[in-house]
Amino acid sequence: MAAPYDLVVIGAGPAGEKAAAQAAYWGKRVAVIDRQAHPGGTMVGGAVSSKTMREAALYLTGFRQRDVYEVGLDLGPSVAVERLRHRTNDVVRLMTESAIANLARHGIDVIHGEATLGPNRTVVVDGAGEGAPRVIPAEVIIITTGSRPFRPPGIAFDDPCILDADAAALINRPLRSLVVVGGGAVGCEFASIFTALGADVVLVDSGPRLLPFMDGDISDLLAATFRDMGMRVLQGAGRARVARTDAGLGVELGSGEVLRPETVIFAAGRAGNTDSLGLDMAGVAVDERGRIVVDDRFRTTAPGIYAAGDVIGPPALASVSMEQARVAACWAFDIPFKRTVDPLPPFGVYSIPEVAMVGLTEQQAEATGIDYAVGRAPLDQNTRATIAGSTEGMVKLVFGRDELDLLGVHIVGEAATELIHHGQAVIHFGGTIDYFIHSTFNVPTVSEAYKYAAYDGLSNVGR
Ligand SMILES: Cc1cc2nc3c(=O)[nH]c(=O)nc-3n(C[C@H](O)[C@H](O)[C@H](O)COP(=O)(O)OP(=O)(O)OC[C@H]3O[C@@H](n4cnc5c(N)ncnc54)[C@H](O)[C@@H]3O)c2cc1C
């Protein structure tokens, strides 16, 4: 048996890396195990890949500039995809190296292999042909094994033209036509990236609106913008059935219409990586969807075993997963540093254009009976957005009618995922929309839209 560690982390995605680094920073002896040869998890393989594809698609097609200057980069589709792949691989390599360096800097042992929980707080690591399994004892175990794409039953994912979200992030060929099934964050991202790259894209969603967790105005504006870009957006389309017949690949919609794309991407949510961990034997309970059950300190039902990140369920964001993991490590070792996860995380969707939100939507404010009002600033009235040729979008504020306290911010537009942090800070500090009225903003900036959304809000409450 190997020498005991204070902490063994199973899974070296963003949650595992941050749990390990947090404990090691406070002097703990830490090992992290991953079945992949390199750390990074879905963050590097999915999130970083898709974001780099987005930037590369915008640059290589001159998507923003071609309307403004009436010139674009005139690369053929296969050259554009080859350059996009090249750039994506480079960024993935750099971010993987950065994770490796962070673990090394903290003196963390990185062990390659498939991990399962053993008896008496041990982890058994099967090193995939690297000798007999190792049994590693630990004072504390943190499970951060993340998630994988949910694959609806009855779909032939062995067909090279039927892809889940992880496979979509690896596409290395130009697509002429594409159906994306799923109007959540990942579906919207891939649908808009491939529209920018010139594919004929249909986005199919079973629900009545895209990004159902977002504010209704924002979902509607995004769908309208997608349509203006040339995408076909089908909402309330029922359950899509996909089959390959002699006629080729077919996507049958609830209406009976059959679409005939070259490729289909399923973006149908995620399932936790818990099947092979031996949770049952170790006394770690899961819920009806196989997600590990934790309390507010990220303790599982087994003493000394914690879990964080995608493996415990929504929101399944790298941003939140990393914070959960740091908090879990702090509770596990009684480190007086970080005891709670921010209850108001921002949500960002890296579609073209981007979407972001923090706090309450108008629908949530209404449902909870809050006396609220809203203010809006369309980006086609914003100087910086006009200069950049990115005028599709809006900043929308939801605030209390009497006190003017800021309750929620909702943005569609380029750099929405950056802009949202102004609103996040104001909400966190208990501010009102007066902050935007009385602060001086750089001009011209897109941030200035906050000021005009606040003025619109004031006029809506008669002040
Ligand atoms: C296409 C796409 C785009 C995304 N975009 C964003 C975004 O823009 N912003 C954002 O915040 N989030 C985004 N996400 C979500 C984000 O990637 C995840 O929330 C995040 O990676 C979860 O981190 P994690 O550490 O919990 O799990 P993961 O990143 O899934 O890592 C889990 C690790 O555990 C390892 N593992 C699993 N089981 C075992 C085992 N038994 N033994 C050993 N190792 C094991 C895996 O190999 C993996 O390395 C995106 C996801 C996808 C798919």
Image: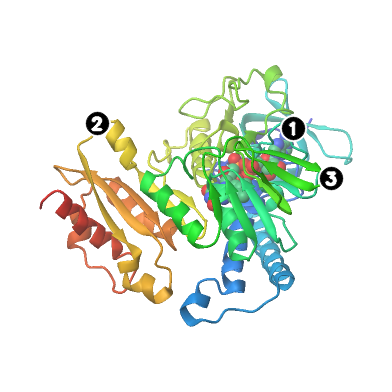
Residue 106 visible in the current orientation = no
Q: In the rendered view, does 110 fall on the left or right side of 160? A: left
Along the polypeptide, which appears first: circle 2 or circle 1? 1
Whether pointer 1 and pointer 3 mark residues with C-beta atoms closer than 8 Å, the reply is: no
Q: Amino acid at mark 3?
A: Asp
* As drawn, 96 above or below 12: below
Q: Secondary structure at mark 3?
A: loop
The response on whether ligand 1 sits within 8 Å of label 3 is no
Along the polypeptide, which appears first: circle 2 or circle 3? 3
Q: Secondary structure at mark 1?
A: loop
Along the polypeptide, which appears first: circle 1 or circle 3? 1
Q: Amino acid at mark 2?
A: Gly
Residue occupying the point 42% across, 44% down: 214
Depth check: give the residue in front, 129 or 51.
Answer: 51
Depth check: give the residue in front, 212 or 82.
Answer: 212
Q: In the rendering, at what x and y percent does residue 185 appear?
A: 53, 47
Q: Quadrant of the N terminus?
A: top right
Q: In the rendering, at what x and y percent does residue 240 appear?
A: 64, 38
The residue to which callout 3 is attached is 246
Whether pointer 2 and pointer 3 mark residues with C-beta atoms closer than 8 Å, the reply is: no
Q: In the rendering, at what x and y percent does residue 375 appear?
A: 24, 52
CA gap, disc 2 and disc 1: 43 Å
Q: In the rendered view, does 339 fall on the left or right side of 463? A: right
Q: Quadrant of residue 291?
A: top right
Residue occupying the point 69% across, 43% down: 251
Q: Secondary structure at mark 2?
A: loop
Q: Which mark, by number, is residue 369? A: 2
Q: Amino acid at mark 1?
A: Gly
The residue mark sitting in front, 2 or 3, is: 3
Q: Quadrant of residue 189?
A: bottom right
The residue to which callout 1 is attached is 154
